[in-house]
Amino acid sequence: MVLSTANLTVDMDIDTKQQFINDVIAECKSVLEENPGNRCAKYCLEYLNSEEGKNLESKDVMTFYKCIKTGLENPDSSLGCYAMTPLDYSKFGGFFDKVIRDYHGDESGDKKHITDWNVDDAEDYDVKKLGQDELSMRVRVGRNLIGFNLPGEMDKDERIKFEQKMLPAFDQLMEKYGGKIHSLTPDFGDIGANPNLISKEEYQKLVDAHVMFKDMDADPYLKSAGISSDWPYGRGCWQSQDKMRIIWFGEEDQLRIMCMKKGSNLLEVFANLNEMLTTVESIDGIEFARDDNYGYVTSCPSNLGTGMRASVHVKIPNLTADGTDKKAKEVCKPLGLSVRGTGGEHTPIGADGTVDISPSARLFIKEKEIIGKLYEGIEKLMAIENSYSQ
């Protein structure tokens, strides 16, 4: 069901506001009847019946609805909410804190995220010791800048403004790493033409090569959240000359910063990303949004904290003998690993049994610990894989 927001204004009267809240509560109850695992509906119901929820001002009711809209319009969501601004996690703390701690498994209710990239005392995470050859390794983080709304709340003008804000930063990155900007923004409005605009054919080649993200407007979850609005304005990427460093702009987060490498030592790609992040944040005017409890701010609560996804492609032909990743997911879940196809979420596994694996944890875990979890996960996964051939 799509709730009517026609009468919602910042100066709506008390009766109009209360009627809309009642409609949201009724919709949450309806969603939970068929989808009891929908965290958005579950905690929204509690929140709107709490003192904090009951006392929301009209403008905050409008923003809060934008945060939860995707979970109500897509009832099969397990999370179902996105922040619209970096401050939403504190402004609507009575809602978001419960969602976050449920999703990230904090039963204590009082954990705080700690950022730590220091790997000076780390082990030698070389997968050759596990009998693996060189692997395709990728580490990425989501980041958002102070001074801008998160993508769900941006309009077309702000998306263009953000892209232009990043252009001097990309110039400095190109001085160090070379490469070029690939932009999908048709024009810069009153400012004029976009010098980095690429053709539809060039864009498709980048998508096929996994350099660029797909058309977000086709994703119902992102569409309901407003994240895919104004496509393709404010969307694109920078890629380094060696093709090993990429920054997406205008996706689910304002920035997705990533490094990839073919190799055997996991610490190499980790160090490359840390170096690039340091370079980006040292650029004048670039400051990443953070929260005192949840670390780096991301649009989706699932990515809070490190915002990091560290993954490798590994061959597990025995666990994928049926041509699917079903068995692999069963084995990997207890190990704290997520399994995807080689092209990302909702893509098939490789014909030779290659899958993409990564630690599931993002929040309440240190960056350096994620790399350790990935190495341990590969070690345990390969032991299970090899046991199937004995």
Image (cartoon, rainbow, N blue to C red):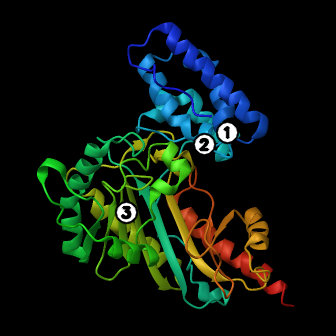
Given the image, on which type of amino acid does mark 2 rest?
Gly
| Residue that label 3 marks | 248
**Cα distance, mark 2 to mark 3?**
23 Å
* N-terminal-most mark, 1 or 3: 1
Q: Secondary structure at mark 3?
A: strand
Residue density around tag 1, few if under 14, some if 14–19, many if 20 or more, within 10 Å: many
Q: How many marks?
A: 3
* N-terminal-most mark, 2 or 3: 2
User: Which residue is pictured at 44% across the width and 40% down the height?
Assistant: 291
User: Which residue is pictured at 61% across the width and 57% down the height?
Assistant: 361
Left or right: residue 167 compared with residue 245? left
Instruction: Give the vertical position of 290 relative to 175 (above or below).
Output: above
**Cα distance, mark 1 to mark 3?**
29 Å
| Residue that label 2 marks | 80
User: Which residue is pictured at 23% across the width and 65% down the height?
Assistant: 170
| Residue that label 1 marks | 39
Residue density around tag 2, few if under 14, some if 14–19, many if 20 or more, within 10 Å: many
Cβ–Cβ under 8 Å for marks 1 and 3: no
Cβ–Cβ under 8 Å for marks 2 and 1: yes
Residue 292 appears anywhere in the view: yes
Residue 102 point in image, percent of width and height: 67, 41
Q: Quadrant of the N terminus?
A: top right
* N-terminal-most mark, 2 or 1: 1
Instruction: Give the vertical position of 26 relative to 386 (above or below).
Output: above
Q: Quadrant of residue 9?
A: top left
Left or right: residue 99 compared with residue 237? right
